[in-house]
Amino acid sequence: MELKAAQVVFLCFLCGLKADPEDGEGGWSSDFSLQDEGVCNIDVLDRSQISYQEFIQRYAYSRPVVLRGFTDNTKFRLLCSKSSLLEEFGSRTVKLSTANTFSYRKVDVSFQRYVDVLLRPQAADALGSETLYFFGDNNFTEWKSLFDQYESPPFVLPNTSGAFSFGIAGAGTGVPFHWHGPGYSEVVYGRKRWFLYPPDKEPHFHPNRTTLSWVTETYPNLPEEEAPLECTIRPGEVTTPPAVRFNTCRYSKDITDCINATVNVFNPLNTNKQFLGVSLLL
């Protein structure tokens, strides 16, 4: 798996509309990225290929799916450029978390300092507990004007409401496998490679090792019967782990690998167990 360069922007919402930088990646691209996108063994469907009823019956409670072209977030994408974010929010304080399973440690820094100093590719020998990145713990009052610009996917589960989570992280970073409820994850810039396991399977991983180490050391040696469901998504695509009803909750984890902006829209649901997974941002 070749390593080059990048950083990752998880969920971005911006206030001032600016032209997309020439690199086409909002100014976030760099020389470090994971080039291997892997296979896609998850259904990928355009808006014309599935109705809401089919989504509920075939996917919402049983298996993941990638939805393509359901919304137009062109404006939102422009608002998520690096220059726009720094201009609007550079002086704002953001809360960073360690990139291990339980994200124990929290650190407050200015958004400007995070981007200029801490936003770096994942070191191959670093532990997740030693890696800080910006994802979740968002101040919805300060960032509301940005969140309001995002168009959410139209398919929602009955009797649920959405909540936004966004962040930015360096190439190759990501939180190991952990639990959380069903939701959408949309890429704004870059690519995001998902690895998902159904509730009756649990991959072997160390909660303090990085996702990058799992992808480079464990994943290539998995026997066929232990291989995950996986797919790499790009801007304009969203993936959703299903809301499977079981006894415990498992979540999909994120690993970042290229400059990437992603939007996660989580729908609280009264279910007990979800797909377990990881996602790798390329």
Image: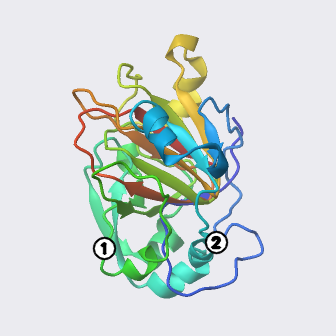
Q: Earlier in the sequence, mark 1 or mark 2?
A: 2
- From the viewer's side, name the closer residue of 195 and 102: 195
In the rendered view, would you say 140 is above or below 213? below
Figure quadrant of residue 92: bottom left
Q: Amino acid at mark 2?
A: Thr
Which residue appears at 41% of the width and 45% of the height?
175
In the rendered view, would you say 31 is above or below 82? above
- From the viewer's side, name the closer residue of 80 and 83: 80
In the rendered view, would you say 21 is above or below 191? below
Tag in front: 1 or 2: 2
Q: Amino acid at mark 1?
A: Asn
Near mark 1 (Cα within 10 A), the count class, few <14, some 14-19 or many ≥20, is few
Which residue appears at 47% of the width and 35% of the height?
59
Residue 236 on image: x %, y %:
63, 58
Residue that badge 1 annotates = 139
- From the viewer's side, name the closer residue of 181 and 142: 181
Residue 125 visible in the current orientation: no
Residue 223 on image: x %, y %:
56, 12
Colour pattern: rainbow
Residue 266 on image: x %, y %:
36, 54
The single residue placed furthest to the right in the displayed view is 22
Near mark 2 (Cα within 10 A), the count class, few <14, some 14-19 or many ≥20, is some
The answer to the question of whether label 1 and label 2 lie on touching residues, with beta carbons closer than 8 A, is: no
Dot 2 falls on a residue whose secondary structure is helix
Q: Quadrant of the N terminus?
A: top right
Dot 1 falls on a residue whose secondary structure is loop
Label placed on residue 36: none
Residue 251 on image: x %, y %:
36, 39
Q: For marks 1 and 2, give the CA distance.
A: 24 Å
Residue that badge 2 annotates = 74
Asked if residue 6 lies left or right of residue 211, the reply is: right
Which residue appears at 64% of the width and 85% of the height?
18
